[in-house]
Image (spheres, helix red, strand yellow):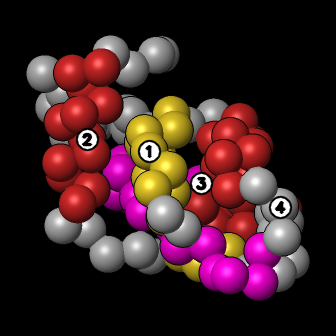
Amino acid sequence: MSLTTKQRAYLRGLAQTERAIFQIGKDGLSDNLVETVNNGLRTRELIKISVLKTVTTDLKELAFDLSMHTKSELVQVIGRQIVLYKKAKDPKIILP
């Protein structure tokens, strides 16, 4: 499922008030992190992830890889924050 521009804008607005619930450190992507993010997406649908300054890889590349591993939609990369969305079986967020 690909998000439209309007849906992305709506999700960015929702994510603005959310706090980051995960942090990615110098180890980067690991199987444990991917599994934890997947669990977070199942619970919340929309999550914000903070990337620490110790990460040496490109942030957009890291965000894209994480979205591919979790089969989620990359909503936004802004600063050192990544926003991901994955529609749940019983959706809590109704997209426009």
**Label annotation for residue 76:** 1
The residue shown at (42%, 63%) is 48
Pick whichever, 80 or 39, lies toward us.
80
| Relative height, residue 43 to residue 36 (above, below) | above
| Relative height, residue 23 to residue 75 (above, below) | below
Foreground tag (1 vs 2): 1
Q: Which residue is mark 2?
A: 11
Residue 76 drawn at (x, y percent): 44, 45
Mark 3, residues whose alpha carbon is within 10 Å: few (<14), some, or many (≥20)?
Answer: many
Q: Amino acid at mark 2?
A: Leu
Q: Amino acid at mark 4?
A: Thr
Mark 2, residues whose alpha carbon is within 10 Å: few (<14), some, or many (≥20)?
Answer: many
**Label annotation for residue 38:** 3
The answer to which image quadrant residue 24 occupies is bottom right
Q: Which residue range is magenta in the image?
A: 38-55
Q: CA distance from mark 4 to mark 2?
A: 26 Å
Q: Is residue 47 visible?
A: yes
Q: Are marks 1 and 2 in contact (CB under 8 Å)?
A: yes
The answer to which image quadrant residue 53 occupies is bottom right
Q: Is residue 82 magenta?
A: no
Locate residue 14 relative to residue 59 in the image: left or right. left
Q: Secondary structure at mark 1?
A: strand
Q: Amino acid at mark 3?
A: Asn
Q: CA distance from mark 1 to mark 4?
A: 17 Å
Locate residue 90 relative to residue 43 in the image: left or right. left
Q: Is residue 41 visible?
A: no
**Label annotation for residue 57:** 4
Q: CA distance from mark 4 to mark 3?
A: 21 Å
Q: Are marks 1 and 4 in contact (CB under 8 Å)?
A: no
